[in-house]
Amino acid sequence: MPLKPEVRKLPGGLRLIVSRDDTAPVVAICLWIRVGSRDDPSGKTGLAHLFEHLMFQGSTHVPANGHTAAIEDGGGFTNASTGFERTTFYSVVPVGMLDLVLWLEADRLGGMLDALTPESLDNQRSVVLNERRERYDNVPYGTGWERLLAQSFPPGHPFRDLPAGRPEDLATVTEDDCGAFFRRHYRPDRALLGVVGDVDPDTVAKLVERHFGHLPPHLPELPAEPWPTAPRPPAEPRRRLTERAPGPALMGAYQLPPHGEAAGEAADLAVTLLGGMSSRGLHHRLVRTDQLAHRARSSVMPLYAAPSLCRLDVRALPGADLALVEKAVDEETERLVDRGVTVRALKGAQAQLRRDWLDRLAHPGSRAEELCAQEAYFGNAAGIDDRLERLAALTVDEVRSAAATHLAPGNRAVLTYEPDADGAAG
C-alpha cells in the first residue's frame, strides 16, 4: 500500500514528513540530522558519533539520561545511530506520548549545550572508546573495514574514516569543539522529522509548530562536498596483514555508483547475485564446492554523496590458500557476467531485495528513517513508494553491465589476513 507521506516545512527550515498508519496504536518519531562522520573536523574523527551520545546527556529542561527514562517509563523505546552522512534519533511509543517525545526532541535540538559539562564529555568519551574496543579493536578482523575504507578513498576524503573515529582524535575533543559542532550542524534547517503511526497529519503539524517553531537556523546553508561521486580506482589496491586471527581471510571493497541512482540499483542486484541465492554465488562456490571457507558474503554499504561500496568478506578455513580464494572470487564474478544474470536469476534477486525492503518498511521506526532519507537526499519523500518499481524495471543487460563494470578486480581494494606465527587466536 502506498505510504503517501505529507511534507511540510517550518519557517526555521525543519522539514516534517508524516505518514499515517492506523494498523497499531503506536507512533514512531525520527529526528534526522544531516551530519555524519564525513563532517568530522580535521583531526577530530569520531566527533559526530560522540555527539550522538552527548545528545542523551540532558538539555535545557531535561536531566542527563532523562530523555530515555521518560520514554521507557511510558512503555516506549528510543535509540540513535551515526552513519557517514546522517545522525538519527528515533523512538517508538504509544500514540499518547507523541506530544512528550516532540517536546523532548525540541528541547535537546535547541538546548543540548545547556547541559554539556566536562564530566558528561569525559563520561561519553569513555563510552564511545569502549564501544570501539568491543566492536573493532579487540575482535578478530575487527579493523578490516576501517582499513578498507582507507584503501578505497584518498587521504583527506570525508568517507575515509569510520564513524567510530580514531582513539587519538577522540582524546583531544574539547567542550569548545562540541559547541562549535553543535552550532554548525544541530539546527532546524539541517533537520528532518519523520512521524509514522496512528496520527492525524494536521494535528502532528500543530504540535511540531508548537515545540520546534521557535528554533531559528544558526548559520547559512553549508556548501556541498567537492569530492567526486563516480567510482574511481582505489587509493591503495592491496594490503596484507599478518596478525593473530582464527584463520586466513580475504576482504574487499568494490566502488559502486551512489545509492539511489539507476546504475546503483543495478549494481545492488549484481551484488545480490554474486553473494548467492540458493545454488550459485560465492557461498556455494567457496563454502560448499571448493571447501576453502566457512563464510563468504557480499553486501552493499549505501552512500549518497560518494561511491557506495560492495563489501566482500571471505573467512577462509585454516591453512587455505588465499590466492585460490581470490581466484575463485574472480571466476564467480566472470561467470556472473558471462552467463549468471539470467531472467530467472534476476527475478530471484529482485524478489530478495523486495522482501528486504518491505521488511524494513513494515516497522514504523525504520519507515520513518527511510522517509527522512528520501526527503533529505532527493527532496522527495514520496519516492519511497517508487523503489520497488525501479528495481522491477531493471533488465538482464543492465545488471550484467553493472557487474562487468563495478565488480571487476581492478575496481576493488583487497585486504588479506594471514595468522601470525603464534597460531590461531583462542
Image (spheres, grey):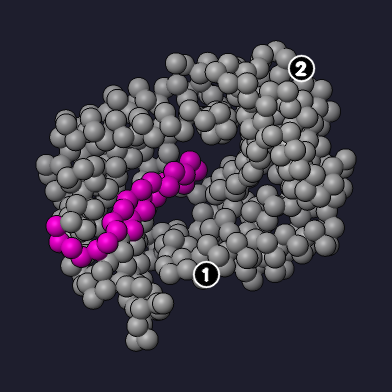
The location of residue 156, given as percent across then percent down, is: 54, 60
Q: Is residue 106 depicted above or below 35 in this figure?
A: above
Q: Nearer the viewer, residue 345 or 261?
A: 345
- Identify residue for label 2: 206
Viewed as shown, does residue 52 lie left or right of 179? left
Find numbered disc 1 in the image and state the secondary structure of the residue it sits on. Answer: helix
Q: Image quarter for residue 95? A: top right
Amino acid type, residue under disc 1 in the picture: Asp
The image shows a total of numbered marks equal to: 2
Q: Is residue 157 magenta?
A: no
The location of residue 164, given as percent across then percent down, is: 58, 59
The location of residue 1, given as percent across then percent down, is: 44, 16
Amino acid type, residue under disc 2 in the picture: Lys
Q: Image quarter for residue 312? A: bottom left
Find numbered disc 2 in the image and state the secondary structure of the residue it sits on. Answer: helix
Q: Image quarter for residue 257? A: top left
The residue stretch that appears in magenta? 289-313
- Identify residue for label 1: 137
* Camera sees residue 208: no
Viewed as shown, does residue 227 lie left or right of 335? right
Most common secondary structure along the magenta stretch: strand
Viewed as shown, does residue 398 lie left or right of 214? left
- Which numbered disc flags the more N-terminal residue, 2 or 1? 1
**At x 85% / y 58%, what residue is drawn?**
117
